[in-house]
Structures are given as structure tokens and as C-alpha cells.
Image (cartoon, rainbow, N blue to C red):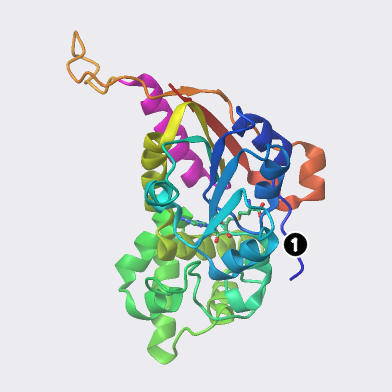
Amino acid sequence: MEIKHIPVLREECKTHLITNKNGCYFDGTGGFGGHLSVFAENLTHNSLIVATDQDTVAFNHLINRFQTDSRIKIYNYNFTKVDFIMKVEGISGFDGIFADLGVSSNQLDDPSEGFSHRFDGPLDFRMDKKQGKTAADVLNGYDEKEIAKILLQFGEEPNFKFIARMIVQYREKSTFKTTQDLAELIRRISSYDKVNKRLMRVFQALRIYVNGELDALSVFLKKSLLCLNPGGRLAILTYHSLEDRIVKEFFRIEEKGCICPPNFPVCVCGKKPGLKIVTRKPVIPGEREINENPRSRSAKLRVAEKI
Ligand SMILES: C[S@@+](CC[C@H](N)C(=O)[O-])C[C@H]1O[C@@H](n2cnc3c(N)ncnc32)[C@H](O)[C@@H]1O
């Protein structure tokens, strides 16, 4: 398979994640192995890297690509299973945990995956094809209010009510089956200057909902903190504000420790800080990287260290 995916902020991810060249690392979004191979090149033969991807195509690719490197172990699980995988591997803690969220260029550019409005494919959107509802199930089965809520919450689409109404009207006469059924409806009801952003937001909203991406991220962050060795780092690459907000807020709360209401004269919760923030401002790609890889333009890397 031709690899189209270029790892985003590759040098920055490597430099921020690796603090011990003989250590144990976890890549929660192995994808096509771009970041994984950068990490592997920079670790010694005494190191261990455990990677997972919930997408079976990506998993099979990773297995093939790294079959001769005994330091690399590959799983086909959601990254929320980081603690379980750690136990299976008999590891007491990771020195670094990494995630590069969302979908890969290979997933986006493969019409059979049905992630992109640019191609016709099944209206599915699941990264893990064994689990949950498809986008078609949502569009054909949910009521107007539920669809509107998904468009607002996960796509931040300003015209969420109108689009939800149009979706429900469409299915009075027809059924949503392919990505183009949805894309053509959006094109038909949108003005020229709005159509691209709207397509992006509607497709994003459905993808995030169908994969439970934001809930998975919150669970992953909490479990990662428990799975890190002291001094170990958590490095997360996000591509939109909803994800970035969750990471930023998690780091902020864990750095602060105490969760008592601000009007309490003394701390009664006893919660201690769990993380020290390494990147006060997120690391973002420079102009050159954005020109070479436009997909990197919205990337933000945030890094924190376990205390
Ligand atoms: C942006 S790509 C990662 C690309 C990778 N860093 C590389 O350089 O090749 C994101 C990958 O994470 C996977 N993924 C997204 N959410 C996941 C989750 N909750 N658990 C496991 N894998 C996930 C997707 O299937 C996709 O292959």
C-alpha cells in the first residue's frame, strides 16, 4: 500500500516525547507508522514501543511494516485500553504516551473508508468497523433534534437547525446510503461561499459522534496519567478546537491539583498536582511544513510531564 500520510510536527513530537532512549513508549494512534518509525529510530535496542490503532487496515499495515523490529508491539484496540495493554505487556509504566488524533490521509483518501465528502463511499465513518452505529444509521434513524445537537456539539455548525431539518426532509423521499447523498444535499442547500466549510463541519460532526472521539480522548488522558512513570511525558497532537480544549483543560486541572471552590479559605480536597505543563503555548507547524503538508495547518501539539 502506498503511504500518503506525512507525520505532522515529526521532529517536535520526537524531541518532546523522548526523555529516556532506553524507555517504554505508547503510541495510541499508530496509523501508518510515521511517528512510530521516528520514535523507533531514536530509541535504543533496549527500548519498547507499544502502538495501537482501532482501524483494522492501519493495524494490518503496522504489523507488516514493523514485523522485523522486536521492540515494537502492535494492537488493534481503542487507545482507551492503554491501561489494559500495559498490563498485557507486563509493563509497570510508560516513559512517554503519544496520540496524533483524528484520521490519517490514507483513511481520508480511500473512498471505501467513506470519511471524505470529496469521494463517493459508504456513509459509515467508523474507524473501528466492528463497533457502533454508522453515519447512515444516524442520518436515517435519529430525530431532527438529535441530529441538530450532533451538528452543533461536534461540528460547531451555526446553521445546525436548518441542516437537521433538511436532512429529515430528504429522508421522507429517500434514504442516505453514500457520502455523496449527504454531500449533494449540503451542496444543494448551501450558498457558494458557505458550502466548503459546511461540508467540513457536517462530516466532522458525524465522524466525531460515530466514533465517540471526545469521550475516548477524555478517558485516554485520565488513564494515561495513571500509566506514566514520574517524569514521563504525555504528548497530544490535535486538529480542531474541540479536541484541543479537552487537552488544554485536562493539563490545566492536573497541573493545579486542588479542585476546591475558589471561595474556600484552605484546601480540603487534598488533590495534588499530577502534571507539569511543558508547552505553555501549543507547538504549531511553521509555514514551510504547512506548504508541504496542508493537512498540518490546524495541528497543535501540547505536552505535559508527570510529576
Ligand atoms: C492522524 S492518524 C495517525 C497517523 C500516525 N501518527 C502516522 O504518522 O502514521 C490517526 C490514527 O489514529 C487512529 N485512531 C483515532 N482514534 C483512535 C482511538 N480512539 N484509538 C485507537 N486509534 C485511533 C485512526 O484510525 C488513525 O489511523
Q: Quadrant of the N terminus?
A: bottom right
The answer to which image quadrant residue 5 occupies is: bottom right
Asked whether residue 210 appears in the rendered view, the answer is yes
Residue 58 painted magenta: no
Q: Which residues are magenta?
A: 238-257
State left or right for residue 64 relative to residue 157.
right
Q: Which residue is mark 1?
A: 4
Asked whether residue 101 appears in the rendered view, the answer is no
Between residues 65 and 32, which one lies in front from this camera angle? Answer: 65
Residue drawn at the location 47% of the way across and 33% of the way down: 248
Residue drawn at the location 26% of the way across and 21% of the way down: 271
The answer to which image quadrant residue 297 occupies is: top right
Instruction: Give the percent coordinates (x, y) of residue 49.
Output: 58, 45
Between residues 278 and 37, which one lies in front from this camera angle? Answer: 37
Residue drawn at the location 58% of the way across and 74% of the way down: 113
Task: State whether residue 85 is above or below residue 148.
Answer: above
Instruction: Give the percent coordinates (x, y) of residue 156.
Output: 46, 53
